[in-house]
Image: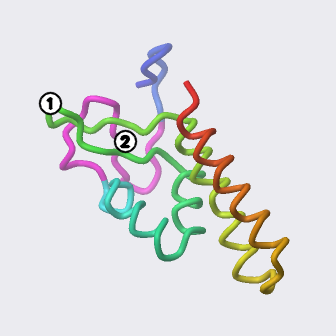
Amino acid sequence: MCPKCGAPQIVVGGAQSVQTGGAASTVPWFRKRWFVLLCLVTITPIASLLAMTGNIHYTGRNGTATVFPKPIRNGLMIATLPWLMVTFGGESPSVALAAVGLLVFAVLLAFKK
C-alpha cells in the first residue's frame, strides 16, 4: 500500500518492499548501508546505481529500517562523476581539480536540509 494515498502497489519478482520503520532484517543485503559504503569506497558507480534504483536503508536508533534522505542519494549519484573522470580522464591537473570540486559539491548537496 502506498504510504501517502493508500493505493495498492505491485511487488515484482517476489521482492519485499520495506517501508520506513520496518524490520531491518527484511532489507536486502545490497540495500544496506555497509554495502553501499563499501561500494562507494571501491567501485563508486555501483553505489550510484543502487541509489538510482531504490532506497538505501540503515538501522535507526530503535532498531528499525530507516531510509536515507533523497539529498544523500543525490550526493551518491554525483560522487560517481569524479570517479569516472579520474578513472577514464587521464592524469591532467584540471581533471583532478574538477573531481575534487564535484566531490565537494556532492557532500554539500548530501547534507543540505
Residue 37 location, quadrant: bottom left
Q: Is residue 16 left or right of residue 69?
A: left
Say if 94 sits above or below 107 in the image: below
Snapshot quadrant of residue 81: bottom right
Question: Which quadrant is the N terminus positioned in?
Answer: top left
Query: Left or right of 43: which side holds 99?
Result: right
Quadrant in which residue 98 is drawn: bottom right
Which residue is disc 2 drawn over? 17
Q: Position of residue 97 (x, y in %)?
A: 77, 66
Q: Residue at x 83, y 81 (%)?
A: 92
For mark 2, does the 10 Å Cα neighbourhood hold few (<14), some (14 to 19), or many (20 or more) residues? some
Stretch of the chain drawn in magenta? 10-27
Position of residue 65 relative to residue 80, above or below, is above
Q: Nearer the viewer, mark 1 or mark 2?
A: 1
Residue receiving disc 1: 62
Which numbered disc, 1 or 2, marks the residue that appears first in the sequence?
A: 2
Residue at left offset 55%, top offset 35%: 70
Where residue 73 appears, x then y in whole percent? 55, 45
